[in-house]
């Protein structure tokens, strides 16, 4: 019973366009980012990176650096405990020893009294390298005689289980009336968080660690750092993770990184708080990207346009080290098996070592790459059948009640509503202008948590004070997306308070309960349900006490506008703050505190990758109108419609913000963004050369909100954090095709590629 | 059932001499005092004080100060909202307008970019005063034709109800075989906290206030600041009080002060965080002292030495403003009515306005002044009866089961044990050396909370993580006394963990539940019971889950050494951290959080001042051996024994620390400390001229701990924060009399006074 039965107008706080509570604070420069935090005695860390993509380290001489006045500590791979390792394989030490495998590899670090001294000290570290042959193309790296990135693995292809086959693809293929087959590819793009990465580590006198760090996973980071401490011989210690205000996450902070481990090592070594923050160049060079993918896709349908099969092979550039990014194929499976009704599905992904940078989580976690191929291919298949691409999608759309081949249980699904909304908007002007075209693409994404860890839960503790104010200690992490607002609105609604009565604390593992992290668009759903659960408990306590005071039954009481009252007997009414004081000052005293741990009833995927990983799924359809300049190849986005089935919008303003941001990120992915690597080296580590879609490039976006209140979501809500950027690139590619008849299959769709394709077409 | 039945040896953590967990941190300079906290954009406040003890303010010109580059804001009384008032009468504005009543009165304040500029700006404020006659002697101030400090009050004598009469003193006096009558007096002494006062105030963009401040009363301070905000027109805002590490409290931080309100006003005015900290001179001049008292006491006993009556009249110098210090007579009533068995008691105290500084809470809250008179008089009475002073006290001592005239219910009382312990120690060497003497004095103090506010409660929230660590959010305030340790030990004992597994958070009203404050020696008892209550709840939850896992009954399980096990079936055992993870990762998940609000069953005093204000009372006897140099009048303390009935020592090491500190403070009060005022002006605002008892003056103190486990106390404990300094002065005065036959009745007992008395005696 998550209050989904109410209509929109019956809510006081939920569904309202409440601006972000911290917006002015941020605009005024008063929010505290990692860069703003100064601790007594704090010193500054800095990391030295490899000068080669692949090389032996013959010798390191740190003596000159150590001798520089103001330097407290210089460490190399020798100073890293043997068992301190990062990544999915736990095989990546925070500073490399003996060898480097990429330009991003850490070779030394210093702590000094000022950032300037630290930088100078790096220049004084003398390293002799012996260069080795590098491999930068994952397909070449798969060849038998390719040099090995890691000799110990015997092959550059990772031994990962990303392979599934549901139904019978080969049989289905034989039955298909229409088949399309093609290769698509995507390259490196990066999160471009406005707040660069950083951490401050410090030990107390018992070697308990406090670390301030930009993280989306305070609880899992705590676990990683506890393991780091163990590796350092510090067992049974306490680790406190404090997350300052984060200037953007987008998945970049879903793991722990070398800079955090190095800050810990330096803090331990010099006995002082060590701050290590990235400048923009480091942010570009030493943080992880989205996975570049080469995708071979084959789809077929019957003569009525019903999809019969989908067959995908993928090669992913794993870079030099295996991060959690190597697990994105597990999420790619979601659109591959479950976007549209398709019974016969085959998927085989290979992650391949190269001497490039390694990728990580990024908004959508593989979904944008997969959806680019699927939805480009869908358009091609529609074309082949001669059907209208929107109608073709309508035929194949998902339905409520469906169970997909991967065993996802589709409970609510407003894909039909989204298709209608997009079509209505895009086709209101039917005049066909030269070089103008429209394209659509759909998406499925987890919208009710995602069980990828043993727990998909989140805890919340609510504490009311004598003045009708509530402090919420949530496991959920606000990283700029507005979870604090959402949490405050949910709690305010349930307790009949105003949103400004609620203060959300999400910044500190000492105070906040466990949560698996801000990923998988799960926070509104999971952290929202945790806060709602605790609010329900505290409400019950309030009603029981209030019933005594007002001489009525708890069921007859309503909480609204900071009041508790009996709706049909308004004599029986008391201000909530007054009630709280009455309870507090009654003999024995009463304190209104409640806690709730919400772990959804979703499933870990089995060995066959089947399992209902989310309690519900979010659907959406994007439509775009573009104009292609056939002289220059430049693509102008004229209109953009992003329609989503969100269950219930707790805050339409913030929801639109999430969609706008996602779409703009998606447009960058589609049209301009690319981390250029040349033999493993980042060639455009700055905002002049990395073509981020900025405010001036943004287009007017319409974001129709389609509500299908989900019985599991808090007040019916589903997640919407990632979807905005998922189907953008294929929608744009489809529109370009509609406009000028060329299909670009390699992201980003730069003017050069469009021009070349136009030239090819015209020849 | 507070676990009092166990013997000392059955405990794992309770009763152990565990050094203060933050000791090394403090010694290394790593603790964060208010002085250490730097916030982004922070500016500095400074206060200008009156140049006269009593004067009209004719004009203030702040134009030059305002024009000084770097000055952000200059405020005077005109800028203080009409309703912003402090003190017991709520009649003291943080900046005075039109008039000043003491040298300590605030007349203006500035905020500037640096402390230096702020100081310079103060010098540029031009004020014209018209001096008025001041009154500095409270007895003179009581005279009819005395000038009035506050015209509106029509009298310098405050209208306060400090008057009681139990039994029939006049009738008892007639029956008395022996009577003594005398006048005693005490002067100003001050807390001398090593950490000076300070606050940082800042508003967010919604005008919610965060204030970092050195306070012993976070919850009540929050209430005061909410009222201050209301006075400023900021209604329904949130106030967050964060207490940094405090360098000593001793009662000095039991109220909110002008500097805090001024920091708030300045922060509001200039829109930036404002830090206002005192230097040592300001700390001496602008913080409150202990109340100077003139005490007329008359006591009588029957021929067997049994006390028949006690009759006390008191005049207290209230200073120029009425703080909570004006309520100390309500606590003085405790020793007056209840130290020793005495049925007929009369007490009449008058607080009198003068143009001196005003006093406030200080360790003992009036008890040291009253006990100085009572115990000096007891010795004189013993002498008059010809009885041994220790024996005389034994005859009159309190007993368990007594109900005193003020209706205090004495449950446990180890006064007999204390008398025995002190006598044994002091009289082991019976040789009588010239100029050497011994003296004793006893004490009663609240040991189980003190209901002076509507609630005497404290809340605690406990949160366990996956690693067997516990975070305790307590209302209780550690101000250096070691409450964190005590709380950690109580929780560790109950949950079978180690003390280092427990982290206590007590610093933040957003996170911590309500508590009435660190006063009345109540924290171990009340905050201890709150933490214990929450620990019991979480333990029950652990046992229930563990019973399922281990296939046994919850009652058969024991928690000890980080393990849960069945003592007579050790196969059934699981590490607590493993159990927590099992629970967390079970379907649905479980989080181990519990909260408890403990409000003792004690009573507010009624109109007749009767009522059992504490759940239990702490008793003690101090004995001292001194040597008086008859040439110089100097008193050397040779031996000191301070025996206390503490219920149960949760941590004997910290308990001794409290006693040592109290005794040294008491010795300063007895022998050397005095804030010298001349016509209202502080003449010795520095550590050269204020004769604080320092480490080099400290003597070897023995602190026998007598345990009488109290059924209401956590593990049987009673409070011990204040007692150490309560009977010190009379014990010393009694020893001096024993040594050289002169009785000094006015504190401090300086060599000059001793010499003068010896001269008087010899003449």
Image (cartoon, coloured by chain):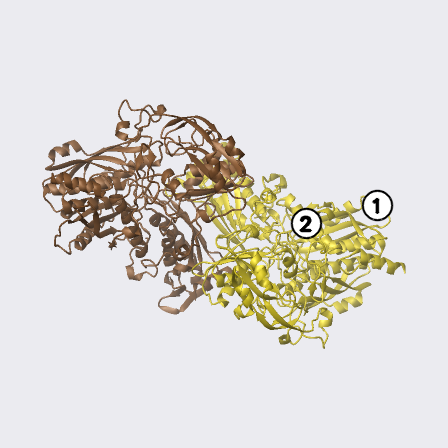
Chain colours: A brown, B yellow
Residue B288 figure quarter? bottom right
Q: Is residue B575 visible?
A: no
Residue A599 to residue B185: above or below? above
Q: Which residue ends up furthest to the top in the rendered image?
A: A145
Of callouts 2 and 1, the N-terminal one = 1
Residue denoted by label 2: B661
Nearest to the observer: residue B659 or residue B13? B659
Residue A458: which numbered mark, if any?
none
Mark 2: give few (<14), some (14-19) or many (20+) Cα within 10 Å: some
Mark 1: give few (<14), some (14-19) or many (20+) Cα within 10 Å: few
| Left or right, B391 with reference to B712 | right
* Residue A634 image offset from top left, x and y in percent: 21, 46
* Residue A696 image offset from top left, x and y in percent: 29, 52
Residue A553 to residue A447: above or below? below
Nearest to the observer: residue A227 or residue B658? A227
Q: How many marks?
A: 2
* Residue A635 image offset from top left, x and y in percent: 21, 47
Residue B763 figure quarter? bottom right
Residue denoted by label 1: B430
SS state under label 2: helix
In the image, what residue occupies the spot 53% across and 37% down?
A72
* Residue B596 image offset from top left, x and y in percent: 50, 52
Residue B182 figure quarter? bottom right
Task: Give the chain letter at badge 2.
Answer: B
SS state under label 1: loop
Task: Give the chain letter at badge 1.
Answer: B
Q: Is residue B666 visible?
A: yes
Assign the C terminus of chain A to one quadrant of the image: top left
Residue A527 to residue B345: above or below? above
| Left or right, B413 with reference to A382 | right
**Discs 2 and 1 lie in a common subunit:** yes
């Amino acid at each position: 019973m998550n209050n989904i039965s109410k209509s929109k107008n019956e809510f006081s706080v939920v569904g309202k366009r409440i601006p972000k509570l911290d917006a002015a604070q941020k605009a005024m420069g008063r929010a505290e980012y990692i860069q703003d935090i100064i601790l007594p005695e704090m010193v500054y860390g800095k990391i030295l990176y490899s000068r080669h993509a692949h090389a032996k380290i013959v010798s390191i001489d740190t003596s000159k650096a150590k001798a520089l006045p103001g330097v407290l500590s210089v460490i190399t791979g020798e100073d890293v405990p043997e068992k301190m390792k990062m990544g999915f394989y736990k095989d990546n030490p925070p500073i490399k020893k003996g060898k480097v495998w990429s330009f991003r590899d850490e070779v030394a670090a210093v702590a000094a009294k000022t950032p300037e001294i630290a930088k100078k000290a790096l220049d004084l570290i003398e390293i002799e390298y012996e260069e080795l042959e590098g491999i930068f193309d994952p397909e070449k790296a798969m060849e038998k005689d390719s040099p090995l990135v890691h000799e110990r693995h015997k092959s550059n292809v990772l031994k990962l289980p990303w392979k599934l086959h549901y139904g019978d693809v080969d049989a289905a293929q034989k039955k298909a009336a229409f088949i399309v087959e093609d290769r698509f590819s995507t390259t490196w793009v990066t999160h471009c968080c406005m707040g660069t990465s950083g951490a401050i580590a410090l030990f107390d006198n018992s070697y308990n660690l406090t670390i301030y760090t930009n993280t989306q996973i305070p609880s899992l980071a705590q676990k990683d750092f506890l393991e780091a401490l163990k590796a350092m011989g510090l067992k049974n210690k306490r680790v406190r993770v404090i997350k300052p205000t984060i200037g953007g996450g987008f998945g970049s902070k879903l793991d722990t990184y070398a800079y955090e481990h190095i800050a810990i090592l330096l803090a331990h070594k010099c006995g002082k708080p060590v701050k290590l923050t990235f400048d923009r160049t480091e942010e570009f060079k030493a943080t992880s990207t989205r996975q570049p993918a080469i995708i071979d896709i084959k789809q077929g349908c019957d003569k009525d346009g019903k999809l019969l099969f989908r067959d995908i092979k993928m090669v992913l550039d794993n870079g030099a080290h295996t991060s959690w990014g190597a697990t994105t194929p597990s999420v790619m499976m979601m659109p591959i098996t479950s976007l549209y009704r398709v019974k016969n599905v085959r998927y085989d992904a290979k992650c391949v070592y190269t001497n490039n940078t390694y990728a990580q989580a990024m908004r959508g976690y593989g979904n944008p790459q997969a959806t680019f191929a699927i939805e480009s291919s869908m358009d091609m298949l529609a074309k082949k059948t001669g059907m209208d691409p929107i109608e073709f999608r309508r035929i194949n759309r998902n339905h409520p009640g469906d169970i997909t081949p991967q065993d996802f249980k589709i409970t609510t699904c407003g894909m039909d509503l989204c298709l209608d909304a997009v079509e209505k908007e895009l086709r209101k002007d039917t005049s066909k202008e030269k070089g103008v075209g429209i394209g659509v693409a759909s998406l499925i994404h987890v919208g009710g948590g995602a069980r990828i860890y043993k727990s998909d839960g989140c805890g919340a503790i609510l504490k009311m004070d004598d003045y009708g104010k509530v402090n919420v200690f949530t496991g959920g992490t606000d990283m700029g997306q507005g979870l604090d607002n959402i949490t405050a609105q949910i709690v305010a609604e349930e307790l009949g308070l105003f949103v400004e009565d609620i203060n959300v604390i999400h910044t500190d593992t000492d105070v906040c309960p466990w949560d698996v992290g801000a990923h998988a668009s799960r926070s509104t759903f999971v952290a929202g349900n945790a806060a709602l659960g605790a609010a329900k408990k505290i409400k019950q306590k309030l009603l029981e006490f209030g019933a005594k005071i007002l001489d009525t039954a708890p069921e007859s009481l309503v909480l609204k506008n900071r009041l508790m009252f009996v709706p049909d007997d308004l004599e029986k009414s008391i201000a909530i703050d007054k009630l709280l004081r009455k309870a507090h000052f009654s003999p024995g005293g009463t304190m209104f505190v409640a806690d709730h741990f919400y772990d959804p009833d979703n499933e870990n995927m089995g060995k066959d990758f089947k399992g209902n990983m989310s309690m519900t799924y979010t659907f959406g359809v994007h439509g775009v109108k573009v104009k292609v300049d056939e002289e220059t190849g430049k693509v102008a986005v004229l209109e953009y419609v992003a329609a989503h089935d969100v269950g219930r919008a707790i805050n339409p303003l913030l929801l639109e913000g999430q969609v706008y941001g996602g779409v703009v990120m998606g447009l960058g992915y589609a049209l301009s963004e690319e981390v250029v690597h040349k033999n493993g080296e980042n060639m455009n580590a700055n905002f002049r050369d990395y073509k981020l879609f900025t405010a001036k490039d943004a287009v007017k976006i319409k974001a129709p909100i389609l509500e299908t209140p989900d019985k599991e979501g808090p007040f019916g809500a589903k997640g919407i954090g990632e979807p905005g950027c998922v189907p953008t690139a294929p929608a744009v590619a489809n529109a370009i095709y509609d406009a000028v008849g060329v299909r670009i299959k390699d992201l980003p769709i730069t003017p050069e590629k469009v021009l070349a394709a136009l030239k090819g077409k015209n020849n």
